[in-house]
Image (spheres, helix red, strand yellow):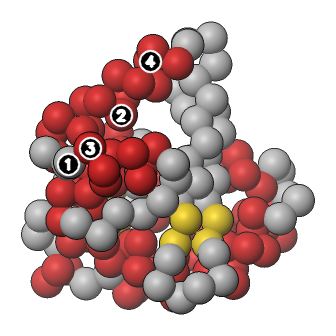
Amino acid sequence: MVDKIWIVAENEPTVILLAISVNLGSRNNTSLDKFFQDCKDRSGVNDDDYELIKKKKVPSSPEGICMVDCLFTKLHIIEHGRFNKRGFVVIFSAAVRGNIQKLKKLNDLGNMCEKEITIIESEGCNVTKQFLNCLGRHKDMLQVIQKS
């Protein structure tokens, strides 16, 4: 079970840092490595993009985006090829630590992304690409949500 995950956007409009901070409780780094390795194998991502993702940066290659898609699918942010707002809010709610105002902003962000992600572009890993683009467009909200 994932205890904690959060996202942060950089100030540059073309660069989004996807800071996945996963605490697997009693599990060790081997479990986390298997989690990432499985998505690496499924996506066919190259070693450079794999290292980028592990450094919490968003890759630009289609295979890299598909690896992020795999991670988001495992976390139920993407379900059945569609953005799952509820899964997004549940997973990222750990970052707001019970702060009701931040939880509302997180929900608002989920609503915005849900509206922006088009069904037409839901094939392959495009939903994840659209979601990452949405996070980039609304990075100001991400910064407010993430700040303690």
Residue in view at x 25 percent, y 30 percent = 38
The tag earlier along the polypeptide, 2 or 3, is 2
Disc 4 marks a residue whose amino acid type is Ser
Instruction: Give x and y (percent) for residue 8.
Output: 64, 65
Instruction: Pick the residue in front: 144 or 89.
Output: 144
Asked if 75 appears above or below 79 in the picture, the reply is above
Instruction: Give x and y (percent) for residue 96.
Output: 77, 55
Label 3 vs label 4: CA separation?
19 Å
Secondary structure under the numbered disc 1 in the rendered image: loop
Disc 1 marks a residue whose amino acid type is Val
The tag earlier along the polypeptide, 1 or 2, is 2
Asked whether the residues under the numbered discs 4 and 2 touch, taking CB atoms below 8 Å apart as contact, a structural biologist would say no
Asked if 44 appears above or below 9 in the picture, the reply is above
Secondary structure under the numbered disc 2 in the rendered image: helix
Residue in view at x 47 percent, y 52 percent = 87
Instruction: Give x and y (percent) for residue 121.
Output: 17, 80
| Left or right placement of residue 121 versus residue 15 in this view | left
How packed mark 1 is, by other alpha carbons closer than 10 Å (few <14, some 14-19, many 20 or more), is many
- Give the mark toward the camera: 1 or 3: 3
Asked whether the residues under the numbered discs 2 and 3 touch, taking CB atoms below 8 Å apart as contact, a structural biologist would say no
- Give the mark toward the camera: 2 or 3: 3
Label 1 vs label 3: CA separation?
7 Å
Disc 2 marks a residue whose amino acid type is Phe
- Give the mark toward the camera: 4 or 1: 1
How packed mark 4 is, by other alpha carbons closer than 10 Å (few <14, some 14-19, many 20 or more), is few
Which residue has dot 1 on it?
Answer: 45
Which residue has dot 4 on it?
Answer: 31
Which residue has dot 2 on it?
Answer: 36
The tag earlier along the polypeptide, 4 or 2, is 4
Label 4 vs label 2: CA separation?
9 Å
